């Protein structure tokens, strides 16, 4: 097995030793999520500020390198081969991080949700690779590919066809996946399967959806995320393509129905807290979002 990890443009050569991030970095935050004690934000991009000191930290750097959608994380002596690929990476017994984030989804995270029947659901999509599909399917047959919104729809059809799975998207973003098998309509919750419900949440895009599983896991797409900067749930107010006013209304309508411990976004960090604490923080986020006004798109203003 081999991976095509070729970037669109060659990175600059770098003398010396150790892990580093090249200039193609888009500051998507994925590397910092996976190796927060060694990679930080500096001048609008990721930077390795400390080399790994243990095998566990070395594995974190490999994870960051395999997840990076621009293939910007390197080590002169360490090659990215399948034997050191940690993905799919278990977050617990039920959810795995797909890794291998795609430049066609702006580097968004994707996940695998294991079901009690032995099957699996994919939420949003990593970069397309037949070899990766084999890895993901090894966790269990994939029955559904659930798209949270238009920005993360790339590769959905290819993965669904490879798995023989159903592809889901909201009608508001249908033009991003016009060959979807199942449409989520309106703003009412839709049961996807046992223990899994889709909650339409228009705001970030017209067709944004979050998926709630087992009263434990909230796959929030780009509707809200955990910020390490504020140590709280946040909305990306400066990157709202449709309407921040609609997002506020969506949260007001939906938040009281949600109970979960894990927030698992496309962009931004993941976090697990007791359900009561998540409920409290989501209520506060809903109140804060009501006060926000529309603003120009500005990726640099996101508080990672």
Image (cartoon, rainbow, N blue to C red):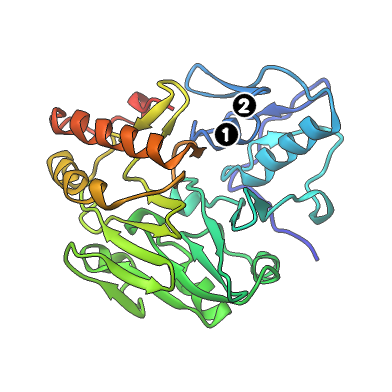
Q: Position of residue 250 (x, y in %)?
A: 18, 48
Residue 243: which quarter of the image?
A: top left
What residue is rendered at 67% in x and 17% in y?
A: 49
Spot occupied by residue 277 in the image (x, y as percentages of width and height): 40, 34
- Residue 78 vs 160, above or below: the answer is above
Q: Seen in the image, is 109 located left or right of residue 77?
A: left
> Which mark identifies residue 36?
2
Quick one: 218 or 103, which is closer to the camera? 218
Residue 65 lies, in percent from the top left, at 68, 40
Give the SS element for disc 2: loop
Residue nearest the observer in this picture, 194 or 74: 194
For the residues marked 2 and 1, what is the alpha-carbon distance in whole angstroms? Answer: 6 Å
Taking depth in this image into account, of 62 and 168 the one nearest to the observer is 168
* Disc on res. 110: none
Q: Are marks 2 and 1 in contact (CB under 8 Å)?
A: yes
Taking the spot 35% from the left edge, 76% from the top edge, the residue there is 180
Q: Quarter of the image for the C terminus: give it.
A: top left
Determine whether 162 is above or below 43 in the image.
below
Q: Is residue 225 visible?
A: no
At x 84% / y 54%, what residue is drawn? 83
Looking at the image, residue 227 lies above or below residue 266: above
Snapshot quadrant of residue 169: bottom left
Residue 38 seen by the camera: yes
Seen as rendered, the residue at the extreme bottom is 164
Of residues 203 and 176, the one nearer the viewer is 203
- Side of 133 where 57 appears, left or right: right
The residue at the point 46 percent across, 54 percent down is: 104
Looking at the picture, does residue 1 appear above or below residue 267? below
Local secondary structure at mark 1: helix
Residue of label 1 = 33
Q: How many marks?
A: 2
């Amino acid at each position: 097995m081999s991976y095509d990890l070729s970037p669109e443009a060659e990175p600059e050569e770098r003398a010396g030793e150790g892990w580093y991030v090249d200039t193609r970095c888009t500051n998507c935050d994925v590397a910092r999520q996976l190796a927060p004690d060694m990679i930080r934000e500096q001048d609008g991009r990721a930077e390795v500020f400390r080399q790994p000191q243990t095998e566990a930290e070395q594995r974190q750097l490999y994870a960051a390198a395999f997840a990076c959608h621009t293939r910007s994380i390197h080590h002169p002596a360490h090659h990215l081969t399948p034997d050191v690929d940690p993905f799919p990476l278990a977050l617990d017994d039920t959810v795995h991080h797909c890794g291998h984030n795609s430049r066609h989804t702006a580097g968004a995270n994707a996940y695998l949700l294991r079901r009690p029947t032995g099957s699996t659901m994919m939420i949003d999509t990593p970069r397309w690779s037949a070899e990766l599909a084999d890895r993901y399917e090894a966790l269990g047959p994939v029955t559904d590919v659930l798209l949270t919104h238009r920005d993360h729809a790339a590769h959905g059809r290819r993965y669904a066809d490879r798995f023989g799975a159903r592809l889901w998207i909201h009608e508001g973003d249908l033009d991003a996946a016009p060959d979807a098998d199942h449409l989520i309509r309106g703003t009412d919750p839709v049961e996807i399967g046992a223990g899994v419900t889709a909650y339409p949440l228009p705001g970030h895009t017209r067709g944004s959806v979050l998926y709630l599983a087992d009263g434990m896991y909230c796959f929030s797409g780009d509707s809200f995320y955990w910020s390490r900067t504020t140590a709280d749930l946040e909305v990306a107010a400066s990157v709202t393509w449709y309407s921040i006013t609609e997002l506020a209304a969506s949260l007001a309508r939906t938040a009281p129905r949600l109970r979960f411990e894990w927030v698992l976004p496309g962009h931004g960090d993941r976090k697990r807290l007791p359900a009561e604490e998540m409920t409290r923080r989501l209520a506060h986020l809903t109140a804060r979002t009501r006060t926000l006004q529309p603003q120009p798109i500005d990726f640099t203003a996101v508080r990672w």
